[in-house]
Structure formats: structure tokens, C-alpha cells
């Protein structure tokens, strides 16, 4: 074998080794980023916690993002976030003429709470609208859901005028009347129903207001290069205060008060979250969502969203995009913030302040 042939063989071997090394580097580079082993306790799937439950439309469904997930002068400092004003104590609850049809029910004699509960309809809905019955507690001087051991002589039945499904219609009103009448008959009481056409007209007006002042903001955080594993997403989200929701692939940022809806929601591919080997699953984008009407403005949820987006974008090498995958400049955040302040003011004027019990019921 000549020196020339030997040189070709050696050169070919070197080229082959270079190709193998390059392919290995590309494969490793494109593998989903994994959670740090040093923080394995955070990287593991957090224990499922029950998301806050609450009773139960402007800006519409808005989407915004930034090319660089960093917003100078607008992030909320981690220490300052602990000093955010706590939403005022909610005094308004139960049936309310602002968003409910209310029919007084006068009983012939005092009715025990046990008997009232036994007379309740099996379902608490009239069509797609929540239905409720309350009794007036003389001792406490307040309306309440009938309680065992208490006695009531005045009751009221109500059905919600509107929610995100739409306005109360004639069929739903008729179902409400049937349920309330059946309850009244069972306790020997007489109901007094308001005019159906008037209430349906009120429902349509309220529904139009809700549609015009409903805002659900959605941002997409997309990986610039390498994808992320579910554990990597969970690990970085946990650093910003997110905990696992009740649904796989859903994380929530809790509000400052117990029992309140989450400030923000982070969603990624549920199939990746439920994979047999999640660390091998690739997640290329996550959704950051804010349901404006559900969160009190004192929580500064939009500022928190921008802070979280900046933190996660920097830590995970991601870029904020609209839902079409188009990066948007940071300046697009300012008009949204201004629009939100106007929206909050409109809701306050209507006595449906964001985060209040009535707003949470209406925008549900």
C-alpha cells in the first residue's frame, strides 16, 4: 500500500470522526433542556394542589409579547411584591340584584333550615345559569344559604342574569320559575316573580357590557433554540412562585388571599406532562395567561405577568410572541397597560370591580 493510499485512509477516518462528533454535538444541542439535578426536588412534578374555587367581557381576548423578554422599569421586585396591597375584604356576596333575577318567597310560617334544604332542587342551575335559594336569618340580620338548625320565614330565589355563556333567555327564565315554584310549594310559601321580559332585557344589557369589558390576555413564551423538558419548565416556573394545577401541563401563580382565583396561569403541552419519560419530551412554547376580571387590580397582575415573562425568558432563553409566533417589541406592553387601567375604571364604575365576587361570577 502506497503512502498516498494510506494518507487517503487516514484523512477519510478523520473526516468520519469529525462527522460523528458534529452529529453528536447537534443532537445534544437540540435535546430538551432538563432540570438541574441539584434542584431535583423542584424539578419533580409538584404535588397536585386544588386550584382556588369561586362562585359562579373593551379589550376582548388580547395577546401581546416582546422580542426580548425584559422590560426595563416595569418589573415588580420580588421583595416589593410581598408588599402589594391586599384586596379589600369582600362584603358583597350571595344573590345581588346587580347580576341576579331575585324572586321573594314568603312562607306562611317559620321553616327550619333542614326542611328548606330538603326542598331544594337537585341541580343548582337553570340552563347554563347558576340558581340559588337564600333565607333571611333574623338573628344575624343577613341573607344566607339555609343552614341546619336555623329557622327562616323569608326566602328569596335567584338566577344569574349573564355569564360567559351568554345572557339569560326566556327558556332559562321559565326553568328558574319552575324550580323556585317547586321550592315554594314544598315549604308552603308564595313566590313573587318579576316580569320576564324586563329581566331578559336586563340580562341582554348586562351581557353586552360584559362582552365589551372582558379581557383575557395570553402570551406565548417560545424557545429560541433548544426545546425544554417539562421538568425544566416546572423548575423555572417554581422559582417564580408557580405551583401545579389540577390539570397536567397547567401551573398557577396563587393570589395573595386564600380561596381566590390564581393571578396567572402557565400552560404547556399536557401530553408531554403525562409522558412516560417526561425528560425526553420536548416543549417548545408555553402560554402565560391572565384572566383580568378574575383578579383584583391591587394585586397588579399585569405587572406580575411582565415580571414573570422577563424572568422566564432570560432563564430559559425564550422570546415572547403573539399566538401566531410573531415576536413583538416591548413597547407594545404600554398601550395594553393603559387599556387595562381604563377597563378597571369601567368595572369599578359599574360596581363590578375586577376580582370582586360579583365580577368573578359574571365573568365565569
Image (cartoon, grey):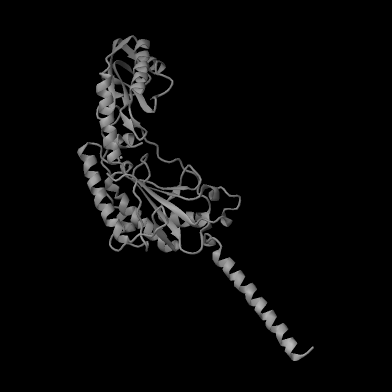
Q: Quadrant of residue 154?
A: top left
Whether residue 216 is visible to the viewer of this picture, yes or no, is yes
Whether residue 99 is visible to the viewer of this picture, yes or no, is no
Residue at image coords 34%, 57%: 78
Seen from the viewer's position, the closer of residues 354 and 61 is 61
Position of 219 compared to 232: left or right? left
- From what the image shows, is residue 30 above or below residue 214? below
Tell me residue 237's x, y (percent).
Answer: 44, 55
Seen from the viewer's position, the closer of residues 135 and 97 is 97
Q: Quadrant of residue 109?
A: top left
- From what the image shows, is residue 128 above or below residue 64? above
- From what the image shows, is residue 70 above or below residue 3? above
Q: Quadrant of residue 153?
A: top left
Tell me residue 166's x, y (percent).
Answer: 34, 32
Position of 131 compared to 2: left or right? left
Position of 138 compared to 263: left or right? left
The quarter of the rendered structure image containing the C terminus is: top left
Tell me residue 128's x, y (percent).
Answer: 39, 28
Amino acid at each position: 500500500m502506497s503512502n498516498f493510499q494510506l494518507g487517503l485512509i487516514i484523512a477519510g477516518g478523520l473526516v468520519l470522526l469529525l462527522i460523528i462528533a458534529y452529529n453528536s454535538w447537534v443532537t445534544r444541542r437540540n435535546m430538551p433542556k432538563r432540570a438541574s439535578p441539584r434542584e431535583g426536588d423542584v424539578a419533580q412534578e409538584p404535588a397536585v394542589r386544588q386550584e382556588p374555587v369561586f362562585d359562579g367581557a373593551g379589550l376582548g381576548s388580547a395577546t401581546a409579547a416582546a422580542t426580548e423578554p425584559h422590560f426595563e422599569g416595569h418589573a415588580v421586585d420580588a421583595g416589593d411584591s410581598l408588599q402589594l396591597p391586599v384586596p379589600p375584604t369582600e362584603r358583597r356576596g350571595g344573590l345581588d340584584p346587580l347580576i341576579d333575577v331575585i324572586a321573594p318567597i314568603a312562607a306562611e310560617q317559620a321553616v327550619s333550615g333542614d326542611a328548606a334544604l330538603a326542598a331544594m332542587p337537585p341541580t343548582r342551575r337553570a340552563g347554563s345559569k347558576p340558581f340559588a335559594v337564600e333565607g333571611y336569618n333574623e338573628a344575624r340580620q343577613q341573607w344566607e344559604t339555609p343552614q341546619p338548625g336555623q329557622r327562616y320565614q323569608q326566602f328569596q330565589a335567584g338566577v344569574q342574569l349573564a355569564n360567559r355563556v351568554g345572557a339569560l333567555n326566556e327558556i332559562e327564565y321559565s326553568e328558574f320559575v319552575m324550580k323556585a315554584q317547586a321550592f315554594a310549594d314544598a315549604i308552603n310559601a308564595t313566590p313573587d316573580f318579576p316580569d320576564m321580559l324586563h329581566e331578559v332585557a336586563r340580562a341582554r344589557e348586562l351581557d353586552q357590557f360584559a362582552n365589551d369589558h372582558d379581557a383575557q390576555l395570553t402570551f406565548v413564551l417560545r424557545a429560541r433554540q433548544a426545546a425544554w423538558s417539562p421538568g425544566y419548565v416546572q423548575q423555572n416556573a417554581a422559582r417564580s412562585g408557580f405551583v401545579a394545577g389540577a390539570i397536567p401541563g397547567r401551573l398557577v401563580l396563587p393570589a395573595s388571599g386564600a380561596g381566590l382565583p390564581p393571578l396567572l396561569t402557565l400552560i404547556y403541552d399536557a401530553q408531554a406532562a403525562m409522558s412516560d419519560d417526561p425528560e425526553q419530551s420536548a416543549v417548545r412554547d408555553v402560554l402565560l395567561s391572565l384572566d383580568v376580571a378574575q383578579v383584583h387590580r391591587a394585586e397588579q397582575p399585569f405587572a406580575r405577568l411582565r415580571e414573570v415573562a422577563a424572568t422566564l425568558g432570560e432563564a430559559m432563553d425564550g422570546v415572547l410572541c403573539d399566538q401566531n409566533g410573531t415576536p413583538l417589541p416591548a413597547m407594545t406592553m404600554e398601550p395594553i397597560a393603559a387599556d387595562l387601567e381604563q377597563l378597571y375604571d369601567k368595572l369599578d364604575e359599574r360596581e363590578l370591580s375586577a376580582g370582586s365576587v360579583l365580577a368573578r361570577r359574571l365573568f365565569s
